[in-house]
Amino acid sequence: MPNQRDEEADDSPIDLPCLEKLDSPLGSPPTASLSSVMELENCVSNLSLAHEIVVNREFCFKPRSPPLDSLESRVTEIVHQAFWDGLQEQLNSDPPNYNHAVILLQEVKTILQSLLLPRHVRLRSQLDEVLDMALIQQEVDHGALDLHRLAGYIISTMASLCAPVRDPDVRALRDLQNPVDLLREIFRVLRLIKTDMVNFTIQSLRPHLLQQAAQYERAKFQQILDKQPASLDNTTTWLQAAALEEASAIRAQSDSPSPDSQSPVSATAVLNRAYMRLLHWDPQNQKYPETVLMDRARLDALAQRLQMLVLEVSVLLLADSQCGAIVSSLQGFVGKLRQSVTVLLEGSHTREADLRRALLGLGETVLQQVNEALSHAGATLPQENQDLLKGQISDLWKQNHPVRTLIGERVQGFLQAMLKGGPTKRSPELPAPLRHVSAELVELGTAFGRIVHFNRTVFGPFYAPILRKLLFPSGEAETGEDSR
């Protein structure tokens, strides 16, 4: 929380500063269509920001900096250096030219004013008095401007407003004597203080957003839908594919081929299957559902982690099948083997060629570790088994590999059971092959379930009519569970 050391302490609640609208366009748009587009973009932006604040507890703003050694970074550095060199040249001239310095002081004043809270009446008045731009201009005209005196006041004001973490940065400003270096560093530290203030505001608003998040997001999405009625087309296709899969699964499990004798398709089961499909998404052949777009990055990250866990368990199962329990029972072997799998497969999920190459190297590493473990136990692995183990691990890149398929089905069953149980229920028991990664799977399932639960809470009213048309096309009443 920012320090307020310059203000009198009282028991009244601290007013929160408003988030600034940066780079807002000036004037009215030339056409109604452009106005509509800008309004829609603003609605989407607000929806995305609110959603990110609610679901991502680590969310915060960071000062933007271009990547090091990039063209943007080099151009930015050159332009900035040219600006500050120009200011240095102006101040070194005889008599000194303070035109740009006055402009910078005005910008500093504006930034400091944006950091003040409504209750900072005395500080605001003092700021207007000391940084009176008309008076400063008069001092410039008479050659009486004292930049160091003004900088001292600015630094003191920054010290009273900044968070404790910025105290060292602010103190360091007092050691700078060159006015150009001093102004340059003042702007850098002010940028950090502004970011701290925005993040403090976000943390303060989060509890209030959590209470109204679902209603807010639902209302914002309805605004988008009103402007673009086709905003549920991909969602409809997504749910339709899940409904067909669920119906096929029910037919496969039924003893009777007659559709009339089969159990009805549940809307909840269709939704759960639809969410599971997001963990195996094919971006080449499918368009992502609009209602889950804001969580796509999180779901993609979970899908990547899920794939790695499936491969880890598959490798452990193959090693165990070829070597017997003697290896897996050795202390520390499973942990060491899992660590090797994680390191060697990292980053190999995006392209099939990368995965094949990584698995080829992993087969060699696993074989080496197995042989070392067996040698400590006074045993050896026959060459035939060594070749078979290496070949089986290398073949895990295939989606239809029997071991990979088996583990994938077990993992999918576990996640589906977690979805059925809901966010407050106890995690289902893991089947034997998955117990080596139990902690990671429960953590992944919990994160996945949290995303699914919030999404269903927000978009349930939009899913319900779609599912009703898919599952009850003739209009008969639904007797099963609703979409939430």
Image: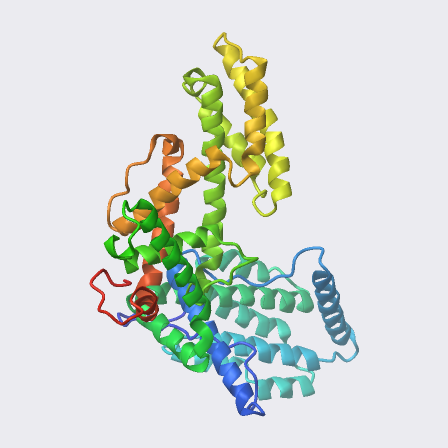
Q: Can residue 162 be seen in this view?
A: no
The count of marks equals: 0
Q: Can residue 149 be seen in this view?
A: yes
- Tell me: residue 418, above or below residue 217: above
- In the displayed structure image, the side of residue 102 where residue 97 appears, left or right: right
Say how the picture is coloured.
Answer: rainbow
Residue 282: x, y in percent?
52, 54
Decide which of 172, 275 is in the foreground and name it: 275
In the rendered image, the quadrant that contains the C terminus is bottom left
Residue 147, image quadrant: bottom right
Q: Residue at x 31, y 45 (%)?
A: 253
Q: Which residue is drawn at 53% across and 76% down?
A: 22
Residue 456: x, y in percent?
32, 62
- Tell me: residue 11, above or below residue 351: below
- In the displayed structure image, the side of residue 328 where residue 184 appears, left or right: right
- Tell me: residue 221, above or below residue 159: below
Q: Which residue is drawn at 36% across and 59% down?
A: 243
Q: Residue at x 45, y 25 (%)?
A: 334
Residue 85: x, y in percent?
76, 69
Hey, which residue is sitting farthest right in the picture? 94
- In the displayed structure image, the side of residue 393 where residue 451 appears, left or right: left
Residue 279: x, y in percent?
45, 51
Decide which of 346, 174 is in the foreground and name it: 346
Residue 47, image quadrant: bottom left
- Tell me: residue 400, above or below residue 471: above
Residue 9, image quadrant: bottom left
Decide which of 145, 36 is in the foreground and name it: 36
